[in-house]
Amino acid sequence: MTAENPGDLVLLDVVDGIARIRLNRPESANAVDALLLRELHEKILRCHADPTVRVVILSGEGRNFCAGGDVKTFASKGEALPDYLREATAWLQLATAALIQLKAPVIVKVQGFAAGGAGFGFVCAADLVVAGEGAKLFSGAVRVGMAPDGGTTVTLARIVGLRRAMDLLLTNPTLSAAEARDLGIVSRVVPDADLDDAVDGLAAELAAQPPLGLTATKRLVWDGLGATVAERLSEEARVVSELSGTADSREALAAVIERRPGVYQGR
């Protein structure tokens, strides 16, 4: 499907606890503009509000995940570009923050290119990233006379370390999927033909787990990035104690003891 009207630029469906958010500008390699980013933020907020959502898959229609900002749109703005970019980057900031703050784990599926503050940025803001072996990833901002955005000046450094992040953002090498995996940017690399099945299988595996435990784990990891171990030990203890009083925790313990699949209600 090719998006022709506002409202079609980002697609969302939820089936069996798995929300699928799909960037839908395949003819433009899913390059983003202000309108698409606004729609993306709205779709992510729908996932926030839907208690049935246990996993979110963010993907792009067509041959590429996301080629970053729509440089043709940017160039067309002329001297009005700064005002336009203030709007576009505001929506990008909101969408990125909303992904990180989702209760549900976020899987990004990468085929083709993942570039720029949107494509590369969403990869760095995800909880898990599955890439086809033919995927290519890079920042690309300085190539067009701009600076990295989408949170990558923070998220990338925390993933790969300061020196590697500086190298990647300043020199903009194009990383293969395998190179990105070795740096920790990508979680798993699979043959291109197996990408859909691999992502679907991972999402189903996560959706079958106790959702409160997944949410607590995601929050502990993200919120603890700038904390000391001592600070997080007390928070971990608090969260574990809190979770132990939930129905899902009791069901999970019973399922392990009885050697059967658990049935979880998110409470």
Image: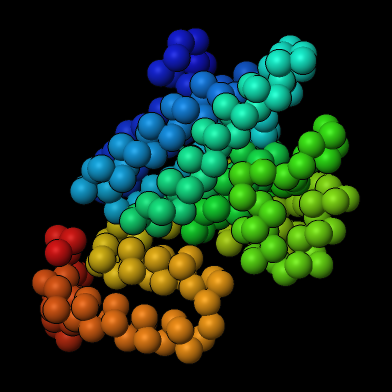
Q: What residue is rendered at 41% in x and 54% in y? A: 101
- Report the side of 52 relative to 224 (left or right): left
Considering depth in this image, is 80 or 252 the residue closer to the camera?
80
User: Going by the image, does 45 lie left or right of 150?
Assistant: left
Foreground pick, 164 / 63 = 164
Q: Quadrant of the C terminus?
A: bottom left
In the displayed structure, 78 sits above or below 31; it is above
Q: Where is 113 relative to 130, above or below?
A: above
Residue 261, position as x, y percentages in the image: 20, 70
Residue 245 can be seen in this image: yes
The quadrant holding residue 45 is top left
Which color scheme is applied?
rainbow
- The image shows residue 68 at horizontal and vertical percentages of 67, 34
x 61%, y 44%: residue? 150
For the image shown, how many numbered marks are present on the structure?
0
Q: Residue at x 18, y 61 (%)?
A: 266
* Residue 234 drawn at (x, y percent): 37, 86
**Can residue 63 be seen from the camera position used here?**
no
- Tell me the residue at 35%/55% (across/down): 104
Q: Residue at the right extreme?
A: 171
Comparing 198 with 267, the one in front is 267
Left/right of residue 38 with respect to residue 146 in the rendered view: left
Residue 29 falls left or right of residue 16: right
